[in-house]
Image (spheres, rainbow, N blue to C red):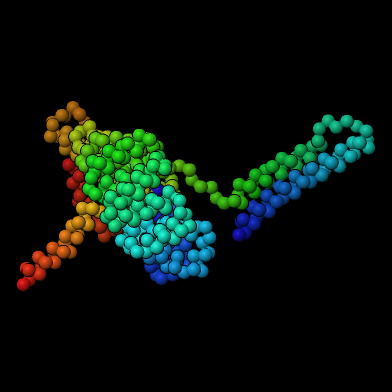
Amino acid sequence: MVGVGDQVELDRLEKQLDAGRKDDIVKYIDLVRKLKVRRSEKVAVHGLALLNNPSSASKLGDEVWNVYEQVAIAAMDTNNLEAAKECIGALMRKFPDSNRVGRLEGMWMEANGYWQQAEKVYATLLEATPADPFLLKRKVAMAKAQGNYSGAVDSLNKYLETFMADHDAWRELAELYTSLLMYKQAAFCYEELILGQPTNALYHLGYAELLYTMGGLENLRAAKKYYAATIELSGGRNIRALYGVVLSGTAISQLLKQTRSRNEEESMEIVTLASSVLKREYKSKAPRKLPLLSPLLEKAVSAS
Amino acid sequence: MGKFGADFMLGLLGVIVLAHAAYATILYRGELKIKEEEFIRPPLPVLLEIVISLALCFWGALRVPGTFLPVLPDAKENRVVTLHANLDFMRLKDGAGSTFVDLFHTKGIKILLTAVL
């Protein structure tokens, strides 16, 4: 997860790199690894430069092998397969029997599109360590890359039977189900995520968005509640959740009007509140966009 | 730096006061031996010194290492901006996408050429 402070630091280091100052390159690569963000292009270019410079590489000490791995993956992600091979070769010479390096080799096969060879590499490694989570995850990624989404779902489900506390895997499964339009199953995954990390506003937001997509009165009401929870957990600074409350509130009242269930009243207080907060935020941060937003919000509030 | 210095000095003063209390107790027990009296409890000034040093040491220990970080999830500093990328499931080669790109590169260019000609 990337917090506010981390984001500020990452942006600062990135700006510095873009300006051509490479003093903090090690710090940048470290931060990218720690935060698990995908900045493959920058990591590949600057990381390779760092590793090719013997004096700066020797300053890294034992950390250099982590950087090799990181740069290898980034290079594969940017389709720089030659550079990736060099990095993997260096790791192979240092750690000839390592599973982690073996996985990189499999990933290199994947990046080349040699699916069968990659499968073979993973199968051999899994024989030695049948419960290696990273290898099992790679198999899911490989199925996904080949367009076999239902296969990916199956193997991920099998993986989750063993590693139930793996939040990343639940998130991936939710995304897979969403892309297969299996919203009910995706909702279950989001519920697991919320149970696992109840203070993470973004999981509440994801669940709310899923419920909003599913539609129907009950789901929309639940979506509104989860949008509200997101607002609470993010201290009202999540603009997407504010929009979500307005939209789901409007959708609920329109549904009620359509079904003419007059005895069911929906409180619109939170919708007006959210729209006033949105207006205030736009006024302070993007005043030029305010004329675009105001009529939309007024329409939404008056329709409800 | 000035504030840090002041807090640090207060903490240090607390330690010195504590050391003095210990020294005074040793002296007091020596005195008791000479007077051949029983030790019942430390004298009042020593107890007072211990209380003062406790307060000063607390002050120093809480103020010198830095400011307190917020613990509430909805605090401004604790907000999660984005989730991390799910790198373990990273797709290194998009099978469907790259086939399209390959097709475009070979067939697409031919089609373009025939259209132009």
A240 to the left or right of B77: left
Q: Pinpoint residue A201: horizontal percent, then vertical percent.
A: 36, 43
Whether B31 is drawn above or below A12: the answer is above
Q: Is residue A235 visible?
A: no
Q: Is residue A146 visible?
A: yes
Q: Pinpoint residue A264: horizontal percent, then vertical percent.
A: 20, 29
At 30% from the left and 56% from the top, the residue drawn is A111
A147 to the left or right of B38: left
* Camera-side residue of B86 and A295: B86
* Number of numbered discs on residues: 0
Image quadrant holding the C terminus of chain A, namely: top left
At 68% from the left and 49% from the top, the residue drawn is B11
At 18% from the left and 57% from the top, the residue drawn is B100
Residue extending farthest to the top is A263
* Camera-side residue of A41 and A76: A76
A19 to the left or right of B65: left
Quarter where residue A300 is shown: top left
